[in-house]
Structures are given as structure tokens and as C-alpha cells.
Amino acid sequence: MLLKLLQRQTYTCLSHRYGLYVCFVGVVVTIVSAFQFGEVVLEWSRDQYHVLFDSYRDNVAGKSFQNRLCLPMPIDVVYTWVNGTDLELLKELQQVRERMEEEQKAMREILGKNTTEPTKKSEKQLECLLTHCIKVPMLVLDPALPANVTLKDLPSLYPSFHLASDVFNVAKPKNPSTNVSVVVFDSTKNVEDAHAETFKGNSHQTVWRGYLTTDKEVPGLVLLQDLAFLSGFPPTFKETNQLKAKLPENLSSKIKLLHLYSEASVALLKLNNPKDFQELNKQTKKNMTIDGKELTISPAYLLWDLSAISQSKQDEDVSASRFEDNEELRYSLRSIERHAPWVRNIFIVTNGQIPSWLNLDNPRVTIVTHQDVFRNLSHLPTFSSPAIESHIHRIEGLSQKFIYLNDDVMFGKDVWPDDFYSHSKGQKVYLTWPVPNCAEGCPGSWIKDGYCDKACNNSACDWDGGDCSGKDAFKGNLLLFLEVSHS
């Protein structure tokens, strides 16, 4: 019955005036649609084939960059990431900090015993990594010697100090109400012999070797106003007499003694008067040179407890703020998708943490834990970036050539594999460029050097790092006024 009805309607439509035209158009549309659908299916199948089998399309974008890539060499990206606000991480950091404090406490106890072998052994484990840090012939005694003890009295009280050339007291930086005594010797051999023989069996006084540095930003330093560092001279000078003979007259007339430390490329100056430092500093800024090399005068700071500086550095290394997560990784991943879509896979190395916003269903992104790459699990937990980086190559499925990024690194423009590596020259190294001066004629060494320099007395240089404030600011402005008036 239904079939007859359909047949009757078909005949009626065909017998109509425009029925044949409508049928023809319908047939054409059907054929065209079939061809278009077939083309779409063909393109889709081809894309799927390329995704699976074409190395040029094996990337986060799923597109072919064959016209831009030289070779279909797969390159992955590896991140190391940690969330410093995680409670478990904070707990582990606290445990590491407490363990370090115990180690430093034990080291101080060993150094405080002043026995020859343990002290020498412990000192070898400590190294001063500050700027221009040198070991000088000085011993620091804590607590200080009695106030009435002079250099003449020293040998009768402490026979091991019979070769000492000077003794004075300085206040502790962190506790100015108490002092330490500094005993100065003329040679390294004398100070080493005295250090080995001093107070054997006496546990009531700690004896430290003295160090001098130009790194004034480190806490726990004492400024020695009658000493200064000279640097900038040619490295060809290996003997103290060589350098002394080349010193300008206006410099040599203001120093009592000079000792060259060629391995550190600095010379230690003992000034006639502590006030001479300011005068020498001004003279060196007026292009004082040796063999065409511009000289620099820097203040000398005394330090003795290297373990305290080491502890401060380690505290900084395990501080929670160092691992604080500001979601930079999210934007770094977006920059890869936009400016480096040729990257094949992305591996994120964590201590087991997973970013809450990360889509783990993405086949191009893989979370790798420290347990997956560390062979010796007793080394975990670790918060050392070099330790983690040395195990990255053990990531399963990692490409032979890969890019290692920190989570705060983001690309601002398109980059390509040949920006990082070429088969002819290998890895490409890009050196950092010199930081420009804050103002013309104001080198970085002039900032916050204790003297108000006219060229640095502006907002761009933070008013010479604070040197041009108060009386110094008036002095700098007065000099500027006089020069302008004179011109």
C-alpha cells in the first residue's frame, strides 16, 4: 500500500512541468556531495597516515613543517618543575635544612678544637667562592684577647704568636657588642705554623684563618679601612716586585706594603692612612693605568667563618621561595605551541607533583618523576638542579637531541631546530651580552663604592647606589654646580 502511494507520487512529480528539472538538480547535488565527502575522507585518512608514519608531522601541532625543517630529526623538550607551596615539599625542605644545620654544627666543633689534622682536613672541605677572595696571613681569635694585651705582650702569653707583626680587635658583624682579635703575620708559613701550634688542647677559644674579599654584599664581613684591593692590571705580572715597579707615583706614595696574589689577579695594598682610600679611588677613576690597563681600587672586607657563609648559601638553596610556583610553566608550554610547534614531545620532570591545570590526556605531554630517572633511590629526595639534570638522559623515549628548559623560560618569537643545533657544527652556544651602564660615563664598579660620582648621580643609577645622598649628595651637586658655573 505504502509502495503504491510512493510510486503514484513519483509519477505525479515527473509528470509535472518542473518535476524533471528538480530531479536533475537533485542528482547533480548528490553526485557533487559524494565527491566532496570522498575528498574529505581522503584528506582525513592522509593526515592520519602522516601523523602516524610521517616524521615531519610528528609534533605537538600535528602539521608538516617539511618546507622549513632541514632534516626530520625528532627533538623533545624537557622541563624540571616543582611547586614550592606544597606542604609535603615544605616538610622535606625543613628536614634537609635541619640536617645541614647539624652538619655545620659538627664542622664548627671540629674547627674549634684547633688540633692540627682535623682542622686542616676540615678547611680543605671549605672553599671561599666570593669575589676576589684570598686567604691572608691572619688568624682570628674568638673570643677576643684581653683588651690590655699588646703586640709585645703576645709572645709571653701565647708563644706560637712570637712572629706576629700586628694585633687588633674588631667587632663581630652580627653582634657588635662583642669583639674578635685579629693577629697578623708576615708570611703564609708563619701563620700556618702558628695556627697548628695555637692553644693545643684548649677548647675555650676558636682560631680561624682569615680571608679578605671585595664581595661586600655577603653578611658577616668587616671592613678593614687600612687595606684595599688593586685589580685591573695585566695578568702578565707574577711577582710583587714587578707590579710595584710599574705602579704610578701617586699610587705608590700612599701605600706601605703591597702583596700580589697572581692566581686571583689582585694585589693587596696596606695604606699609609685609611683616608687615602678615597683619594686613591678618585685617582683611579681618572684613568690610572698600567701598560694600558685601567686600574681599580676596591675596599677589603675581612671574613673568617666560611661555614657560616656556606650555611647561608645552602639555606638559600633549600628555601621555599626558590621553588615557588607562579604558573610560568603554563605560559612556557603555550609559547612552545605557538613559536616551536615542531617539538615532538614534552617531558615534565617533577618530584611526583602534577600541575593542577595540566591535561594529562594529551599524548604529547608526559610527567616523569625523580624515581623514574634516578638509579640510586637513596639519593632522593633531592632539591639540587645539577643532580636532577645529570639524570635527564635516562628518560624513557627521549629523543637523542632534546632541549632542556626551566619552567620560567618562554619563547617570544618563532624558533627552529637549527637555532639550537646543526649537523655541521653541532650545538650552538650563545654568549650573554654585556650589561650596559646605567648612564654614560658611569661604569658598574662606580656604583655604591662609597664616593658620590657626578656621572652616576641620577635616577637611572639610583643616585650612585645611595652614595649621593645626604652629605655626599650635596658634595656631588656642588661639584656639578661649580663645573657648570666655570664653563
Image: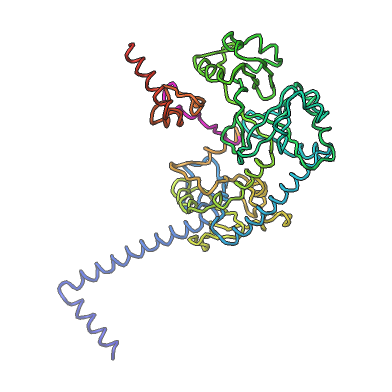
Q: In this view, does 51 lie above or below 27?
A: above
Q: How many labels does the image show?
A: 0
Q: Does the magenta stretch include residue 429?
A: yes
**Is 325 or 36 nearer to us in this picture?**
325
On the image, the x and y values in percent for residue 363 come to 53, 60
Residue sticking out furthest to the left? 17
The structure's colour scheme is: rainbow
- Judged left or right of residue 316, residue 335 is left
Residue sticking out furthest to the front? 148
On the image, the x and y values in percent for residue 143 come to 71, 38
The residue drawn where x is 52% and y is 17% is: 279
The answer to whether residue 345 shows anywhere in this view is no
**Which quarter shows the C terminus?**
top left
From which residue to which does the magenta span run?
A: 426-441
Q: Is residue 116 above or below residue 484?
A: below
**Which quarter shows the N terminus?**
bottom left
On the image, the x and y values in percent for residue 441 come to 44, 21
- Judged left or right of residue 355, residue 300 is right
Q: Which quarter of the figure has residue 437?
A: top left
Q: Is residue 247 above or below residue 409?
A: above
**Is 70 or 419 nearer to us in this picture?**
419
Please tell me whether the stretch drawn in magenta is mainly helix, strand or loop: loop
- Judged left or right of residue 463, residue 182 is right
Q: Does the magenta stretch include residue 137?
A: no
The answer to whether residue 353 shows anywhere in this view is yes
The residue drawn where x is 59% and y is 25% is: 225
On the image, the x and y values in percent for residue 118 come to 82, 40
The residue drawn where x is 32% and y is 65% is: 31
